[in-house]
Image (cartoon, coloured by chain):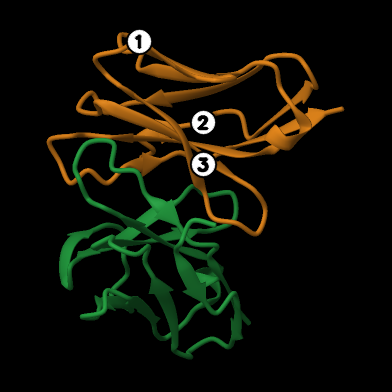
Chain colours: A green, B orange
């Protein structure tokens, strides 16, 4: 158990809809990262938040947004969903101490868009 | 353009033998490298790392070798055990940047009893 929790585990929705994925980081970790893993793809970095502020952006679509709340949990919002958004979405957290930024991953949310 | 490449999607090994997972990178700014292991229905977990100032790092049955001139690293598992069956992700990062590693697509290792 990494200490990172993600809800829900599975989500099935239709094209055009909007969903929210939730992540609670390990106790004490200030950084939260969101990744997308599509079929046969590696982990694509989407966005990082550090102590409530956006710190880094990766390949995140404009239809996607995230935020980190004062209690440090984070939400990833996906809107106007398309079939291609079907993927595993992982949240990770870290102490953000610099080099060897070991990230602790949650179990992921599997999103299926029909 | 993939900056971290794991060209073998899968690898099958007999229990007790050596497993060698390979990873190539293209960005010369990368100076730290990590391996993560992922079981089905779980998130990736950190396995071992290496800095560019070293060419080898060992942790029990796991050893990572780094060849900077070839921009190549490998993970050796000796001896391989059925419990090692998982997807292994190679990741690389630049300490002068955002410290967010770039991940490869993973290699699925199957260790047969």
Alpha carbon distance from label 1 to label 3? 23 Å
Give the residue at mark 1: B55
When the figure is inspected, residue A63 is found, relative to residue B5, above or below; the finding is below
Badge nearest the viewer, 2 or 1:
1
A31 and A80: which one is in front?
Answer: A31
- What residue do we see at 31% from left, 65% from top? A60
Q: Quick check: do tags 1 and 3 share a chain? A: yes
Task: Give coordinates of residue A15: x percent, y percent.
Answer: 53, 86
Chain that bears disc 1 = B
Q: Are marks 3 and 2 in contact (CB under 8 Å)?
A: yes
Give the residue at mark 3: B105
Alpha carbon distance from label 3 to label 2? 6 Å
Instruction: Report the side of A48 relative to B5 (left or right).
Output: left
Badge nearest the viewer, 1 or 3:
1
* Sequence order check, earlier mark of 3 and 2: 2
Task: Give coordinates of residue B53: x percent, y percent.
Answer: 24, 14
Chain that bears disc 2 = B
- What residue do we see at 17% from left, 46% from top? B98
Q: Are marks 1 and 3 in contact (CB under 8 Å)?
A: no
Chain that bears disc 3 = B
Check the picture and name the quadrant holding the N terminus of chain A.
bottom right
When the figure is inspected, residue A78 is found, relative to residue A51, above or below; the finding is below
Q: Quadrant of residue B95?
A: top left
* Sequence order check, earlier mark of 2 and 1: 2
B24 and A31: which one is in front?
Answer: A31
Instruction: Report the side of A47 relative to A103 (left or right).
Output: left
Task: Give coordinates of residue A52: x percent, y percent.
Answer: 18, 73
Q: Secondary structure at mark 2?
A: loop
* Sequence order check, earlier mark of 1 and 3: 1
């Amino acid at each position: 158990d990494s200490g990172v929790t993600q809800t829900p585990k599975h989500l099935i929705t239709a094209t055009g809809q909007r969903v929210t994925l939730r992540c609670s980081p390990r106790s004490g970790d200030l950084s939260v990262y969101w990744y997308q893993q599509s079929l046969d793809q590696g982990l694509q970095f989407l966005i990082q938040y550090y102590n409530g502020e956006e710190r880094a952006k990766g390949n995140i679509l404009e239809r996607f947004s995230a935020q980190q709340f004062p209690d440090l949990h984070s939400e990833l919002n996906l809107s106007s969903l398309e079939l291609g958004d079907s993927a595993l979405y992982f949240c990770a957290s870290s102490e953000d101490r610099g080099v060897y930024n070991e990230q602790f991953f949650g179990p992921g949310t599997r999103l299926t868009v029909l | 353009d993939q900056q971290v490449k794991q060209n073998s999607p899968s690898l099958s090994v007999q229990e007790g033998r050596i497993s060698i997972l390979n990873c190539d990178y293209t960005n010369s700014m990368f100076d730290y490298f990590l391996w993560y292991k992922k079981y089905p229905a779980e998130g990736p977990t950190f396995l071992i790392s290496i800095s560019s100032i070293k060419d080898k790092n060992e942790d029990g049955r796991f050893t990572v070798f780094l060849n900077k001139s070839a921009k190549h690293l490998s993970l050796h598992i000796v001896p391989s055990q059925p419990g090692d069956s998982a997807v292994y992700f190679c990741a690389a990062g630049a300490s002068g940047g955002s410290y967010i590693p770039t991940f490869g697509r993973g290699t699925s290792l199957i260790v047969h009893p």
